[in-house]
Amino acid sequence: MSKAEIGIIGGSGLYSMPGLSEVRELKQQTPFGDPSDPYVLGTLEGRKVAFLARHGRGHRILPTELNFRANIYGFKQLGVERIVSVSAVGSLKEEHKPLDFVIPDQFFDRTRHRIDTFFGEGVVAHIAFADPVCPELARVVDAACKKSKVTGKPGGTYLCMEGPQFSTKAESNVYRSWGMDVIGMTNLQEAKLAREAEICYVTVAMVTDYDCWHPDHDAVTVQDIIKVLTSNAEKARRLVARLARDLPREHERCPIGSDRALDSAIITAPEARDPALMAKLDAVAGRLLRA
């Protein structure tokens, strides 16, 4: 039986989820190692929820050090069908102000040192990723923003950089010239792995600053960001509670096929598949690999 239906990933500033009842912690073990933190399981607005602090409580894990595979695999083991990932970002456009929430529908990869697939070493799969965000989930998040009196902006591109350093001015201005909307360090790998795990995924990008391109805000500091994070975290909690209340209980088929992404993705012939890797992939792709 599923232990959770909705997964919540809390980013910088969001390390807990007040309002949960029937709370218990679960230290999940996965074939890909340990997730960032124990999952906090509970009931929110009548829905079974699993919360994970992306960087661990106390914020002790760098973006590059995150075990993205373990984090997403753990959600899959718990039965999660939809993930809402909350993340602090910098703005690359004047219109996206600090304290705004952006709901991006595209990603652009500028990372260099990340593992972002469950496959390889014996089983090859190529998922479709033209539309990396579930539009139905994004629509519900946008509606929940309005009901929660949060400034939510649907659409736009999240540029995922390596970090942990912030951008140079040259980099920031190039990204602006490309038409990017926000910049962060974490969510692209989550989106890719959620798609491979056939979990619908959406990012709630909480704007904390103007990166370093803005002439009036050209020196981004952690201290400045923390001030905004505190306010953003409270708004994010209200939003997630509203989202849990409003998310349809029946999970209809995803309009872009997130929930069946592997149907035509695995290319390795059955007789050539590595048995050890097939065992590791059981929670993610077992319905196809065991067929």
Image (cartoon, grey):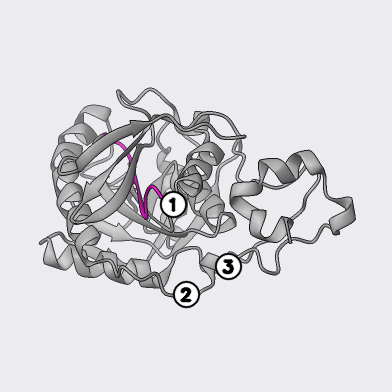
- Residue with the mark numbered 1: 1
**Disc 2 secondary structure class:** loop
* Dots 3, 2 in contact, CB < 8 A: yes
Question: 80 or 123: nearer the eye?
Answer: 80
Considering every residue shown, the one lying at the far front of the view is: 1
Question: 193 or 93: nearer the eye?
Answer: 193
Q: Distance between the residues labelled 1 and 3?
A: 20 Å
- Residue with the mark numbered 3: 260
Against 231, residue 181 (above or below) is: below
- Residue with the mark numbered 2: 253
Against 97, residue 167 (above or below) is: above
- Disc on the earlier residue, 1 or 2: 1
Q: Residue drawn 28% across and 39% down?
A: 218
**Disc 3 secondary structure class:** helix
| Mark 2 closeness class: few <14, some 14–19, many ≥20 residues within 10 Å | few
Q: Distance between the residues labelled 3 and 2?
A: 9 Å
Q: Give the range drawn in magenta.
A: 1-15
In the displayed structure image, the side of residue 38 where residue 31 appears, left or right: right
On the image, the x and y values in percent for residue 280 come to 67, 40
Question: 217 or 54: nearer the eye?
Answer: 54
Query: Would residue 287 be counted in the magenta stretch?
Result: no
Which tag is nearer the camera, tag 1 or tag 2?
1
Can residue 205 be seen from the camera position used here? yes
On the image, the x and y values in percent for residue 53 come to 34, 35
Specify the amino acid type for callout 1: Met
Which tag is nearer the camera, tag 1 or tag 3?
1
Against 154, residue 73 (above or below) is: above
Q: Residue drawn 38% across and 65% down?
A: 156
On the image, the x and y values in percent for residue 87 come to 33, 45
